[in-house]
Image: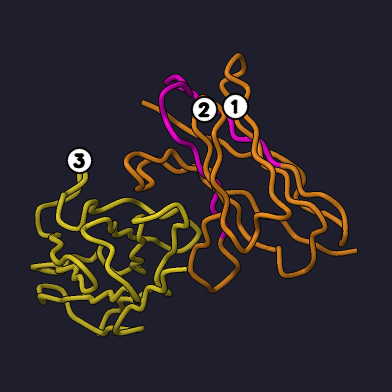
Amino acid sequence: DIQMTQSPSTLSASVGDRVTITCRASQNISNWLAWYQQRPGKAPKLLMYKASSLESGVPSRFSGSGSGTEFTLTISSLQPDDFATYYCHQYNNDAYTFGQGTRLEIK
Amino acid sequence: QVQLLESGPGLVKPSETLSLTCTVSGGSISSYYWSWIRQPAGKGPEWIGRMYSSGDTNYNPFLKSRVTMSLDTAKNQFSLKLKSVTAADTAVYYCARTYWGSFDIWGQGTVVTVSS
């Protein structure tokens, strides 16, 4: 199976900061990558698909980039609502896998 | 808009079969893939499997021997059966619409505990 490794595991930041989360795939997944945001007790919410496409309704401060094995999710100016856990997810083949998550906390 | 709702027992005994149903409202189950995903407490999500409205399925290789998914287009529902459960199967179980591989609409999740 394709392993997805996120870094960092925890990120401390302040409102207004620009932050970047990285996701690495154990093999080439082209751009078949999605990013999700999950708040405690809630289902994950799709933010980005095909690595850099913004899901409808998601604020434009979120952006994604990358292809092959290395990907990033960037939040340009953190808002209070953005403090949550973020997961990457690859769907290159018929065995989907997720990263272990990055918890974004208030500094 | 399309909404998904999981239902089923919250407690299952070890070695028995976990059975869940996802009801789709606000849209048709046809012409989409539908997935089950689970998330143990404090861990990342794990994809269990997906089913197309035609009945075609793909399962997580690590769970494939224990998983069966089915679909009822008349009721706009799809279901999950996971047999021979152990405590390691305790998790929040989600159903989700799968669009070009990503999960764009999720249910609220249902907690399933495996315990005697």
Residue at (35% x, 39% y) in the render: B99
Q: CA distance from mark 3 to mark 2?
A: 20 Å
Q: Is residue A65 left or right of residue A34?
A: left
Q: Is residue B21 left or right of residue B18?
A: left
Q: Quadrant of residue B26?
A: top left
Q: Which residues are magenta?
A: B20-38
Label 3 lies in what chain?
Answer: A
Label 1 lies in what chain?
Answer: B
Same chain for mark 3 and mark 2? The answer is no
Q: Colour of chain A?
A: yellow
Q: Is residue B41 above or below residue A90?
A: below
Which residue is the site of mark 2? B24
Q: Quadrant of residue A3?
A: bottom left
On the image, the x and y values in percent for residue A48 come to 23, 53
Circle 3 residues within 10 Å: few <14, some 14–19, many ≥20: few
On the image, the x and y values in percent for residue A94 come to 45, 52
Q: Colour of chain B?
A: orange
The prevailing secondary structure element of the residues shown in magenta is: strand
